[in-house]
Amino acid sequence: MTPKAKPETIAVAAGRMSAEHFGTVNTPVYRTSTILHPSYASLKAEAQSRYSYGRCGTPTTESFEQAVAELEGAARTVSVPSGLAAITTAILAVVSAGDHILVTDNVYGPTRRFCNHALKRLGVETTYFDPLVGAGIEALFQPNTKVVFCESPGSLTFEVSDVPAFAEVAHRHGAVVMMDNTWATPLYFPALARGVDYSIQAATKYIGGHSDVMIGTISVGEEHAKALTSFVRDAGLFASPDDCFLALRGLRTMPVRLARHWGNGLTLARWMAQRPEVARVLHPALETDPGHALWKRDFTGACGLFGVVLKPVSETKLAAFFDALKHFGLGYSWGGYESLIIPAQFVRTAQHFAAEGPVIRIHAGLEDAGDLIADLTNAFVNMEAA
Ligand SMILES: *Cc1c(COP(=O)(O)O)cnc(C)c1O
């Protein structure tokens, strides 16, 4: 018996269909709406055929979803047009009017907007919880609580949550756990194995990996596969074949890219931590981080994304810092091969985040770490001079 393949091997091997495609290594892009049937009988039996209509998936979609499912250890992965669509789709697949959901206070900002606007209008109530609440989340449960939605480390402030504790409580109360696992990816946090029911990826980030595709995935075990798939069908959602192709091409090299993002990110984080302009660094792989013990227990790696809390500084000086950078792009998103930086703005309603000064978010790309440090050094000189 061969042992279960490691993630690096799965990333290379999963979802390939060479034998069905003249031996080509990659499954080609199938652009189609209509799928023709050879006969009246075959058309009538459409529901039983593997491919029935463009919106319901083609071999391109299937290759991508199969590869993600194998990495996630999932029975089923569905792909949708963006990471945010993966989040909203997972929630909508489960909740009904009159339900209540628990959402982490450090959730990705647009997820909060969705809960506060669309979900509220549909009659679903949201309570935000302190990401560090752990098993204490039980006190927030109501008889109609259907979902615990977590993200760890959370957006912009990078607190690590006790996800297995959430799962234990949620399952006892008949609720499901959804996790935005974009930061760690299934490589560094095997969400389903940690008790998560709906593992969500903004595949736009590390899976795509090249800043050229927007796509999201939801992965579930057998017990949720049918309900999720049928909701996605009913809603008319699907990711385009070109996007599935690009995302799958990115996924093949994700393990090697992530290892380097991790190394570069940690190098920059350690360097930042000893800068006089910096109050503290928000990176759970740093031994000094409050989330380090949980990170060590549950995660097997870190990506290139982390936060820095600066000491109080004027807007003019902050602008001088940002504008001096040459290797860090100023822009949203992350997970591509290139380094990025943004000033972080966030809302907290459950637990105030006390920052000494401005918070910035850094994405360490695949460049030479020494070049990145030289760039940041120069930017701090520019800040001082402004
Ligand atoms: C970017 C991001 C998303 C949304 O992904 P899109 O593909 O941009 O819609 C969701 N969650 C997190 C944590 C993100 O950083």
Image: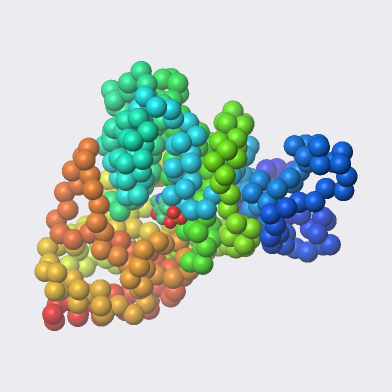
* Residue drawn at the location 76% of the way across and 43% of the way down: 50
Can you see residue 226? Answer: yes
Viewer-closest of 9 and 241:
241
- Outermost residue on the front side: it is 40
Quadrant assignment, res 242: bottom right
Q: Is residue 207 above or below residue 364?
A: above
In the picture, measured across the screen, residue 165 lies left or right of residue 244, that is: left
Q: Residue 371, percent across and down? A: 38, 78
Residue drawn at (57%, 31%), measured in percent from left and top? 227
Q: Nearer the viewer, residue 69 or 2?
A: 69
Viewer-proximal residue among 114 and 317: 114
Which x, y percent locates residue 370?
Answer: 38, 76
**Where does the C terminus fall, quadrant-wise?**
bottom left
Residue 284's place in the image compared with 276, above or below, is above
- Residue 29, image x, y percentages: 69, 62
Q: Quadrant of residue 226?
A: top right
Q: Is residue 194 visible?
A: no
User: Quick check: 129 left or right of 162?
Assistant: left
Q: Is residue 5 left or right of residue 309?
A: right
Q: Quadrant of the N terminus?
A: top right
Display coloring: rainbow
Name above or below for residue 48 compared with residue 171: below
Residue 116 point in image, percent of width and height:
30, 40
Query: What residue is shown at x 39% (from left), y 66% (from top)?
Result: 364
| Residue at 43% from the left image edge and 49% from the top image edge | 84
